[in-house]
Image (cartoon, helix red, strand yellow):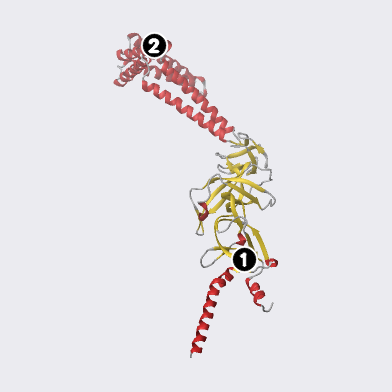
Amino acid sequence: MKRAITVVLILGVVIGLSWLSYQTFGSQAVQKQAVDDADLEKFVVKRDAIAATVSATGSIAPEAEVTLTFELGGKVEEIFVEKGQMVKAGEPLAKLETDSLELQIAQAQATLALNEAKLQQTMKGASAEDIAAAEAELASAKANYEKVKAGPTEDELIVAKADMEKAAIAVQKAQAEYDEVAWVPGVSALPQSAALQQASIDYERAKANYQQIARSPTESELKSAWAQVVQAQTKLDKLRKNPEPEEVAIAQAQVDQAQAQLEEAQLKLEKAVITAPFDGVVASLGAEVGEMVSSGTPMVVLVDISSFHIDVEVDEIDISQVAVGQEVLVTLDALPNEEIAGHVEAIALTASVDDGVVSYVVTVAIEPTDAPLRVGMSANTAITTARNENALVVPNRYILIDRESGKMYVERLEEDGLTSRVEIETGMRSELYSEVVAGLEEGDTLVLRGLSSRERVRRTFGGPP
């Protein structure tokens, strides 16, 4: 019995020592592993500059691009440029026929001159000659009225009666001469027949005139004669006094209207010519000389290639890191050996949504460069959102991430030649490197195993290759 108890105690001590040994050395064996330089890459932790970047793609765009059109329709008379030609701001590019427009300007100028003369005349008032003429017209109207009112004088009646009697005698004489040849065939064609007819007409006229003079004036005749007096008096009064403010205002309004019509005609003439709004290159032409074009027809596409920019779309997750003025590195598919500097020039205030993806347009201005840039080239941009010139850095491929906890680790080579798994905290991250803010020190050596875990297990415990 005592022997059994002793065996049990010995077994307990062995088990306890085994457990203590595992706690002391077993866990360290998990953390530390032997290394074989043949399957190992090493990196010495160092301080270096690191930059956090946001990448986006776009295409090269000119400083400005505009499609120029005629505001008026018409026939193209002349094109002053060719495709690919450099032009200066204000230089004429194309012109419509302008004959009708020039005629409209001439007519508007004449109308303006006439209305200006009328305004001057209205403001100046009547001349002495105008007043004298109006006074004579009034006197004549008054004399005519008095004459109509008084009726014919005795002398007028005598003259009118004498004219009538004279005409009667002429009829009798013509009748006697006609009677002498009345038997002749075709007498109506003889002069005697024509003379009789004319004498009869003269008599009827003289008789009517006598009857008109002999009778008293009618009320209608008196009113008509008096109306002429009133009209002449009104005209004279108007000439004698200063112009009314309303008259001057009307004359001025006519001048203003004529001036506006002239300016409109001149503006139409200006619109018949397309001029360059800025220095640039003619990218394309939309019509030929002699061709009819309507208003709004694209005529000239002008681009300003004095500078270039790129519009890129940045995801909403990254846009908060982007700010105006940040440095940008630009690479081009067409020029793989070129790296071009740029900076963030503008950030859109509103988002665009495409298939549920929210993004913001960021304009990247390209710094002056000798690279042969062309509009439309595909461009890759890396926007530097943060920078640390003295960061503790490690290559991204040395960092391991625990899928369950999300924690990050590296394998550090210890002084005893074994490696240990070390948890780290990172800061900025670029395409190749990450900043380490906790867990490592400058000079630490990290290792990256070239063999898979399965291969390492196979080599450690044996097994088929």
Q: Which residue is mark 2?
A: 136
Residue occupying the far front of the picture: 2
Instruction: Say which residue appears at 65% left-offset and 51% top-offset.
Output: 332
Dot 1 falls on a residue whose secondary structure is: strand
Amino acid at pointer 1: Thr
Q: In x, y percent, where is residue 222?
A: 31, 18
Q: In x, y percent, where is residue 351?
A: 49, 52
For discs 1 and 2, the disc positioned in front in the rendered view:
1
Residue occupying the far top of the picture: 155
For marks 1 and 2, the one nearer the N-term is 2
| Residue sitting nearer the eye, 243 or 455 | 455
Amino acid at pointer 2: Ala
Instruction: Give the numbered dot on residue 419.
Output: 1
Instruction: Say which residue appears at 53% left-offset and 31% top-offset.
Output: 265
Classify 3 as above or below 433.
below
Which quarter of the figure has residue 435? Answer: bottom right
Q: In x, y percent, where is residue 164?
A: 38, 14
Which quarter of the figure has residue 104? Answer: top right
| Residue sitting nearer the eye, 193 or 81 | 81
Count of marks overlaid on the render: 2
Classify 439 as above or below 12.
above
Badge 2 density bin: few <14, some 14–19, many ≥20, Cα 10 Å: few
Dot 2 falls on a residue whose secondary structure is: helix
Q: In x, y percent, where is residue 181?
A: 49, 20
